[in-house]
Image (cartoon, coloured by chain):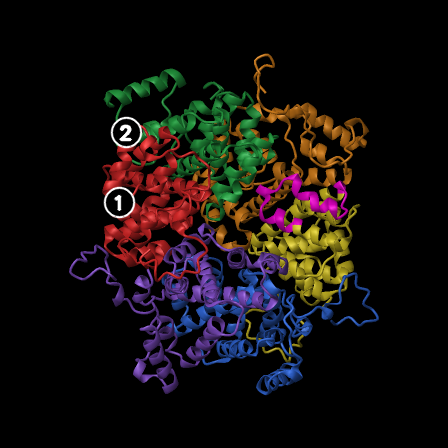
Chain colours: A orange, B green, C red, D purple, E blue, F yellow
Amino acid sequence: MKTSPTTNTSTSPTTHSTRPVTALDLATPAVADLPDENRRYFEKCQQKLGMIPNVLTAYSHNVAQLEVFSRFYNELMLGESELTPLEREMIAVVVSAENHCFYCLTAHGAAVREYSQDPVLGEQLMMNYRSATLSARHRAMLDYASLLTRTPALVTPADAAPLRQAGFSDTAIWDICNLIGFYNMTNRIASAVDMRPNEAYHSQHR
Amino acid sequence: MKTSPTTNTSTSPTTHSTRPVTALDLATPAVADLPDENRRYFEKCQQKLGMIPNVLTAYSHNVAQLEVFSRFYNELMLGESELTPLEREMIAVVVSAENHCFYCLTAHGAAVREYSQDPVLGEQLMMNYRSATLSARHRAMLDYASLLTRTPALVTPADAAPLRQAGFSDTAIWDICNLIGFYNMTNRIASAVDMRPNEAYHSQHR
Amino acid sequence: MKTSPTTNTSTSPTTHSTRPVTALDLATPAVADLPDENRRYFEKCQQKLGMIPNVLTAYSHNVAQLEVFSRFYNELMLGESELTPLEREMIAVVVSAENHCFYCLTAHGAAVREYSQDPVLGEQLMMNYRSATLSARHRAMLDYASLLTRTPALVTPADAAPLRQAGFSDTAIWDICNLIGFYNMTNRIASAVDMRPNEAYHSQHR
Amino acid sequence: MKTSPTTNTSTSPTTHSTRPVTALDLATPAVADLPDENRRYFEKCQQKLGMIPNVLTAYSHNVAQLEVFSRFYNELMLGESELTPLEREMIAVVVSAENHCFYCLTAHGAAVREYSQDPVLGEQLMMNYRSATLSARHRAMLDYASLLTRTPALVTPADAAPLRQAGFSDTAIWDICNLIGFYNMTNRIASAVDMRPNEAYHSQHR
Amino acid sequence: MKTSPTTNTSTSPTTHSTRPVTALDLATPAVADLPDENRRYFEKCQQKLGMIPNVLTAYSHNVAQLEVFSRFYNELMLGESELTPLEREMIAVVVSAENHCFYCLTAHGAAVREYSQDPVLGEQLMMNYRSATLSARHRAMLDYASLLTRTPALVTPADAAPLRQAGFSDTAIWDICNLIGFYNMTNRIASAVDMRPNEAYHSQHR
Amino acid sequence: MKTSPTTNTSTSPTTHSTRPVTALDLATPAVADLPDENRRYFEKCQQKLGMIPNVLTAYSHNVAQLEVFSRFYNELMLGESELTPLEREMIAVVVSAENHCFYCLTAHGAAVREYSQDPVLGEQLMMNYRSATLSARHRAMLDYASLLTRTPALVTPADAAPLRQAGFSDTAIWDICNLIGFYNMTNRIASAVDMRPNEAYHSQHR
């Protein structure tokens, strides 16, 4: 929080930082007790991001899962793709907005603010992407993210036509579908277990 | 925006402040051309809030409507009630979150941050109030706001039982219903006409 | 009711007229105890309409709210606008039909019957406006009322295109949005508190 | 319509009675051209009800279907059952209200008014049965009708518990399910083909 | 079941065949105790189908209902129509898939497999007909079945345009509407009472 | 398909096996052209399962994605967990049934039939798990899978109470959430790109 402790006379009933990472009792180990490879990954996160994202801490009670989740996440968000890093984060935010996921909106909202250097854009995508002034490419991409999130049973390949008209290749469409799917997964996990985002995200890149 | 012009290399396609207040062509008068009473009200807003909220500018093409809307709004938000100003703003944000209203989430999100001095609480109510640590009173109040917003056809007086159990009087329940109703009105107007919130809201009370 | 007491052998468990105006205990004053201005307004209603609409009685426990609600209502329904009185009532009924609001359907259904002199039209709008034979103008207006009532999060200014094609000006579109918003407000208040319509409405203009 | 032609200056764009029975071109025979048995049934309707219900006219293009539909309808509505005729009509109206079916609401709304001798009850069931003052038995019955109409995929035998608590036998529950099912059928047929109710229904038993 | 008793080490908690036909206590008579006409019909089913469909057993506690239901069913499924038997079964399956009806999917899924001699097609229609490779005629027919099942309140005659474009006559459209309606009825009855399909269906025509 | 070619006079418009794996043009390499590690994995699938599951073929245009997806999948489905293999497959089927995913229902439906040795159970979970006779543990698990799939925005940790009452540890609840999330991902990808299940699944373990 940006307000200093001396002026903060908050009526809020909690100090957010004292909340555990999830509502489950998962016997999460201390970082020092993680296997070497995982510990090094966490230290790298700390150095690069200034924090260990709580989603990783949550998974760390099961290092086998932590490993495969991290790799899958990193491949989709940082791997080879026609989609820019900002575009991948935009999809993350719009899917999470449809599903009202506090964790993912907080973490990926900060990322949209960072990559776009446009803090208002981040707010718009969190609140209702339809209010944002978007390129035809981004509008088609986010309309599709909303549609496939809300009504997967009704979607057929014909619904990808606007993506092709906006210039996305079939490989990019595949990547878009994977990202939409991925956040439909994480949104459900995070909401179900009440995953807490690291508090630092809230004030980043405002 | 907090980023200075020299460092802002945004890839965003618009400068947000150049967007008109609504997508409709409403022949909105300059403040100087408003009738005296309305002009004085706008000047008072400018002095007190540092801005004329865009919802008032939008209504100013019809001063008769501007007058009655402002009075109704002021009575519900500032008039005599058991509900605190923060509670009224919390209802505004939660209703607007269910309806994904960019204008109302922006304006009333800033107000929740201001009244609560808790910027994270503001984010939580915008994203999903169920993630917030709330008193039993506030949880009952916001559950009801969500329910009456989403499924008005199914609501009966029996659904107010948790409000009474949380200590709200029948007069307070009436006020809660009016506030829920009011933002279900403004959300629809604002989304339909693409009303733009004043840009200053975004960075306030972070 | 049109059936005389002597022939009414109803199996219904209540006499409708004995139900209180709302399910809340609101310490509603007698008309004689209202402040002069409000009392005169109620007397005017009695003279002109043959009743004091129960929505006004409900608000009268808080004369400040009564005042601003009445003015807002009167401005939207009777103020300057391209929309005819019948069109405003048609919107009221169609919004209320989507929300299944007993109070508003009863009161505004009677008004549609009165203004249109077509009792079947009133029934059709209450049951399903899509069954009515409507001008292109009215069809566009009511399709929009249904859409903005049901899915406010999905509506953008592009959805107003059929209104413009049907000849509505941007000022009329603003008025339509305000009316749709207004009844989404009153529907929620009335259903939540189980507001009873004055019984006279049911048999009017049949 | 009750208003006499001389005073009717309706602005409505149609004379309702000139609309065909359905929007389909079904080569419906004249009554005189029907097979003897069907013709006698239609004549009996005319004598007893003062009209041939349009649903029968619609089916008459296929006398084999007319026969089996009529028999099924008559058995469910008039056959042996613990449910009173009024209760069967109440179910018809509540199912049709959830599905917004103009034809069925009109025809069965008139029947509820007739059997209950309570015109307000008819209106309440059409608008929102939750607003009606009902016995525990009728409330359970209509809650179930609403539930099974709206979310058939979620219903299990456990949802019938309130019906048993309200005193319905298993045979009566079977009959209730059949009636709910039947009107979910007719609502879809009538809405799909825009079936017109006989105009006389609108003013009956007001 | 195809697995022989000796190799079946199922962990499933029940033997399916011991479940009663419905969850209601309906005093269903033995076949031998049915009136002659009904008994002969059941014997004919046994001979022709190798079973008495459980839906008939369920209705047999009320022979008047059994009679009219069977006749209506037989007329719609086997009577004169432009629709082939396979098409009628396809509609049955797609409606039942939208409503997630175990009984109807099982019985009519077997029929689609039988008539089409294409066991995969049966699976596709049960799971999501949009995944099937269909003729334009069948695609239009099943899109309409899905639409009228899910949103009857929104359907108007204009929604039948794709059916006409696909070559269906108005009489065929009437039949399609009746079939869609019929399975919306039976789905609700079967799910509400937990009707068990005859176990033989599951392995037929695989 | 079990019917022999000589007797199959199918009226179905396609031979299912000629459909490509997805509707996207993804330049999928031949197995022989895959990198050694992936090729060996595919050969192992062929040996063990008698097929290379089409989801893997679909991912093989991007071997980096193929790698991380396979590992994540294998960890969730085969890794250390309190959940039995059958329970994991039951979750896969119930999530996929809510989302009407043809690919996942086909592949995981076969797995439920295999692990349970109960072909009817597989059908019930695909059609409507509420129709199955389930242990309290499995009922709680599948109710939760349905809830978190349909309404993620409304779920809080309180909704996991029935899982704890059914004996699941917090670690098992975490695994359940991950599985529900995972199939909400794959369902969306598979439906969006029209992924075809290997035809062999349909007739397995019937």
**Residue F136, position in %: x, y?**
73, 54
Residue at point 51%, 20% (across, down): B205
Q: Is mark 2 on a helix, strand or loop?
A: helix
**Which is nearer the eye, A83 or E71?**
E71
**Which is nearer the eye, C102 or B5?**
C102
Q: Which numbered marker is on residue C37?
A: 2
Disc 1 residue type? Answer: Gly
Disc 1 crowd rating (10 Å Cα; few below 14, some 14-19, many 20+) is few
The residues colored magenta run F144-171
Main SS, magenta region, reads helix
**Which is nearer the eye, A177 or C5?**
C5
The earlier-in-sequence mark between 2 and 1 is 2
Left or right? Give the position of A195 relative to F137.
Answer: left
Determine if the magenta segment contains residue A160. Answer: no
Instruction: Identify the residue under disc 1.
Output: C50
Which quadrant holds the C terminus of chain D?
A: bottom left
Left or right? Give the position of B162 relative to F170.
Answer: left
Which quadrant holds the N terminus of chain D?
A: bottom left
Left or right? Give the position of C52 relative to E146.
Answer: left
Q: What element carries label 1?
A: loop
Residue at the right extreme, as displayed: E6
Distance from disc 2 to disc 1, alpha carbons, whole Å, reads 19 Å
Chain identifier of the residue bearing label 2 in the image: C
- Give the quarter of the image for residue C69: top left
Chain identifier of the residue bearing label 1 in the image: C
Q: In this view, does B182 lie above or below F57?
A: above
Residue at point 28%, 49% (across, down): C111
- Regarding residue F198, the answer to whether it shows in the image is no
Disc 2 residue type? Answer: Glu
